[in-house]
Amino acid sequence: MTRLGSPDAYYRRAKNQGYAARSVFKLQEMDKRYGLLRSGQAVLDLGCHPGSWLQYASQKVGRSGRLVGVDLQEPGVSLPQGSCFIQADLLELTPDQVRERSGVEVFDLVMSDVAPRTSGIKDRDAAQSLELTQAALDMALALLRPGGSFLAKVFFGPGVDDLIRQVKGAFKLGKGHKPDASRSASKEIYILGRGRK
Ligand SMILES: C[S@@+](CC[C@H](N)C(=O)[O-])C[C@H]1O[C@@H](n2cnc3c(N)ncnc32)[C@H](O)[C@@H]1O
């Protein structure tokens, strides 16, 4: 079992390949499995710092795509032309503010890797993660085009089943997924919604 915070093979691979974080391999795996990212898409990346998902997504959406990143902290990677970063607290940001600041009216994919600063107190961390992921889902429901997709991390705990139920109700397909690159010691899972109704 890999301890949280200790460098592992994914960490070293990310470093060697010039990615800002090992999280890139979780997105890469889920993209390969579910075909989430395509050329020309508009993608909203919630919790985008330090930027490995932005790096991966920019290769996939290409020059005709649009990437919008949101985080409390600026990403450590340079954004491709036509993309933008919104420095904001997801819990306070509104869909209209995203539209106004990015110039993008509707998105093909809303993905969230937002995670609270963990305290080590399992119930508190899970409750904060749930609140953030609910905010990510609310944002996605307001900004996704019909047929669009949602992908979001959440720490497993009370309320996650209800979140998955909401996703199943709002999308043609809703499910939870634990990528191989997610540390086995981590309580995180990813919730996927395909085909916004
Ligand atoms: C695991 S990191 C994301 C890693 C990123 N996907 C990558 O590949 O580089 C989680 C991010 O969530 C952000 N975050 C936590 N709470 C937030 C909030 N309330 N609003 C916006 N971002 C938040 C943190 O600042 C942190 O950068």
Image: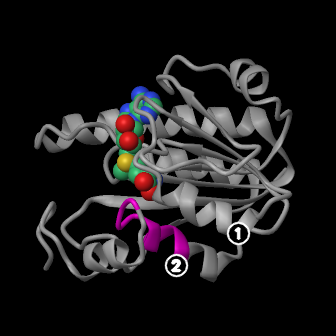
As drawn, is 95 to the left or to the right of 145? left
In percent of the image, x 74 and y 30: which residue is there? Answer: 102
50 up-or-down from 88: above or below: below
In percent of the image, x 34 and y 44: which residue is there? Answer: 158
Pick whichever, 64 or 42, lies toward us: 64
Q: Gap between marks 1 and 2, in whole Å? A: 13 Å
- Residue 29 badge: 2
How many numbered circles does the render carry? 2
Say which amino acid is labelled 1: Lys
- Label 1: which residue? 60
134 up-or-down from 112: above or below: above
The N terminus lies in quadrant: bottom left
Residue 72, x across and y down, in percent: 42, 28
Say which amino acid is labelled 2: Glu
Task: Locate residue 35: give its quadrant.
Answer: bottom right
Q: From this viewpoint, is residue 49 visible?
A: yes
The magenta stretch spans which residues? 20-29
Q: Residues within 10 Å of mark 2 (few under 14, many from 20)?
A: some
